Image (cartoon, helix red, strand yellow):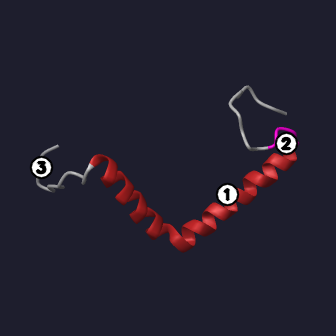
Amino acid sequence: MRRGNTAPTALPTHWSPQEALAVFEFLQALREQLWELYGSDVQQAWREQVEEQYGPPPEFDPDAPF
């Protein structure tokens, strides 16, 4: 069943709810395994992307009042 999204997509629109759930569960398991293997590398790559776009984060001063 196709939802209200009318944007073009590369995903099939004829899957049953059970087929969509199976794909969703597979992707979730894949995501968990990727995080186990590459989590710290992914975080570092993300930091580098953010710094490229926005610059380095501000310095943290633990004594600054809140």
Q: What amino acid is found at the position of numbered circle 3 in the picture? A: Ala
Q: Residues within 10 Å of mark 2 (few under 14, many from 20)?
A: few
Q: Are marks 1 and 3 in contact (CB under 8 Å)?
A: no
The label nearer to you, 1 versus 3, is 1
Which comes before the other along the chain, label 1 or label 2?
Answer: 2
> Is residue 26 or residue 62 the one in the foreground?
26
Residue 16 percent location from the top left of the image: 88, 42
Q: Position of residue 56 (x, y in %)?
A: 24, 54
Please report the residue visible at 85 percent of the width from the left and 33 percent of the height from the top: 1
Q: Which residue is mark 3?
A: 64
> Mark 2 is on which residue type?
Pro
| Furthest-bottom residue in this view | 37
Left or right placement of residue 36 versus residue 12 in this view: left
Image point (55%, 66%), residue name:
35
**What mark, if any, has residue 17 been given in the picture?**
2
Q: Please report the bounds of the magenta region as a residue range.
A: 12-16
Tell me the CA gap for discs 1 and 3.
40 Å
Dot 3 falls on a residue whose secondary structure is: loop
Residue 41 horizontal/vertical position (percent): 45, 69
In the image, taking residue 62 as reference, residue 57 lies left or right, namely: right
Quadrant in which residue 46 is drawn: bottom left
Q: Residues within 10 Å of mark 1 (few under 14, many from 20)?
A: few
Q: Earlier in the sequence, mark 2 or mark 3?
A: 2
> Amino acid under label 1?
Gln
Q: Residue at x 56, y 71 (%)?
A: 36
The residue at the point 85 percent across, 42 percent down is: 17
